[in-house]
Image (tube, helix red, strand yellow):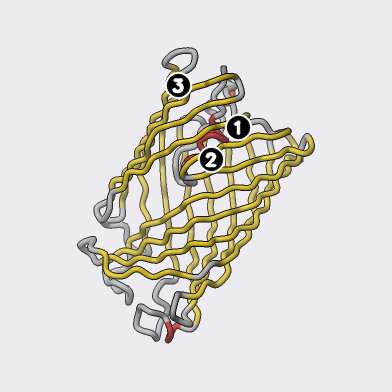
């Protein structure tokens, strides 16, 4: 009786959380996979303002079944700076954000139907300096197999951060979650998706996810000196995946963000302002190789 690690966990938690290797083959347990993805999000206007924000995000990850390391670089561009609802209306308030995360975890079998996953990770999200930017992340999930194709998942994720700690539920129902051909799905929070493999090497996927990043601002930030910014959104996507060879996977995606929020905090972690952005669209390209 299998737990389909890669697809199940990718469907329930965010990109910077530990992800298992794509199958149960013990010979692959320590073999790494590397992944690179580039995403572009078009300009989105702040409500009641002509000021705009756009993002380019480059992601790199190397992982096996027991450890995952990923790095992200967010290029933040703003337009109509004089119309932005924050900053000094003269210079770009943010030019870039960076994120580094390392996680480790273990899946234990409780009995023939139950498995339990626990992961622990460290992450830093920052503009320039990393002091007071470190978070500790815990994920705990229980898996109950109703049959070889259907699993119930329930648990939680917890993030400790000096500014704002969070606990979120992680729940879902998984159907054939690691099968490439035919229908497969994971429905839950914070991500749901449905896949259809229409050929031996082609698959299309549609999903909905909730994402957020909380980052330390620079000491001389014109938004909030030595403070923090949190960007959160709901995101829908359609992804086309191609496997030209067993070890290779390439993918392209189209995205729509109906909800976009930008929050600022001072250096003591007190929320200062919240700004909503209008819906926007994006696109991405990526490649993954399993050694």
Residue 192 screen position, x and y as percent = 54, 43
Name the residue located 35 percent from the left edge and 64 percent from the top edge. 229
Rounded to the nearest whole Å, what is the CA distance between mark 3 and mark 2?
17 Å
Q: Residues within 10 Å of mark 3 (few under 14, many from 20)?
A: some
Badge 2 is on which residue?
Answer: 11
Query: Contact, CB < 8 Å: mark 2 with mark 1?
Result: yes
Q: Residue furthest left?
A: 268
Residue 73 screen position, x and y as percent = 48, 59
The answer to which of 69 and 105 lies nearer the viewer is 105
The answer to which of 244 and 254 lies nearer the viewer is 254
Residue 92 higher or lower than 67, as above or below: below
> Can you tell which mark lies on residue 177?
1
| 81 sits left or right of 120 in the view | right
Residue 84 higher or lower than 141, as above or below: below
Q: Residues within 10 Å of mark 2 (few under 14, many from 20)?
A: many
Query: Contact, CB < 8 Å: mark 3 with mark 2?
Result: no
Callout 1 secondary element:
loop
Query: Contact, CB < 8 Å: mark 1 with mark 3?
Result: no
């Amino acid at each position: 009786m299998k737990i389909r690690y890669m697809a199940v966990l990718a469907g329930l938690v965010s990109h910077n959380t530990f992800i298992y290797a794509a199958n149960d083959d013990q010979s692959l347990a320590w073999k790494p996979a590397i992944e690179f993805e580039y995403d572009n999000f078009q300009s989105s206007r702040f409500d009641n303002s002509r000021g705009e924000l756009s993002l380019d995000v480059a992601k790199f990850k190397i992982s096996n079944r027991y450890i995952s390391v990923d790095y992200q670089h967010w290029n933040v561009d703003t337009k109509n700076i004089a119309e932005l609802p924050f900053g000094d209306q003269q210079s770009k308030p943010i030019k870039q954000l960076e994120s580094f995360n390392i996680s480790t975890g273990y899946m234990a079998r409780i009995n023939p139907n139950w498995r339990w996953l626990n992961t622990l990770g460290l992450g830093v999200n920052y503009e320039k300096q990393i002091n007071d930017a470190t978070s500790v992340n815990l994920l705990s999930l229980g898996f109950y197999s109703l049959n070889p194709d259907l699993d119930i998942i329930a648990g939680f994720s917890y993030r400790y951060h000096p500014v704002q700690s969070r606990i979120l539920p992680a729940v879902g129902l998984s159907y054939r979650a690691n099968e490439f051909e035919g229908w497969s799905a994971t429905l839950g929070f914070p991500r749901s998706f449905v896949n259809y493999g229409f050929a031996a090497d082609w698959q299309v996927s549609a999903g909905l996810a909730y994402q957020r990043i909380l980052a330390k601002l620079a000491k001389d930030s014109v938004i909030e000196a030595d403070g923090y910014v949190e960007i959160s959104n709901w995101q829908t996507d359609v992804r086309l995946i191609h496997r030209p060879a067993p070890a290779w996977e390439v993918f392209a995606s189209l995205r729509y963000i109906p909800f976009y929020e930008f929050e600022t905090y001072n250096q003591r972690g007190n929320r200062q302002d919240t700004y909503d952005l209008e819906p926007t669209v994006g696109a991405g390209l990526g490649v993954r190789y399993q050694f």
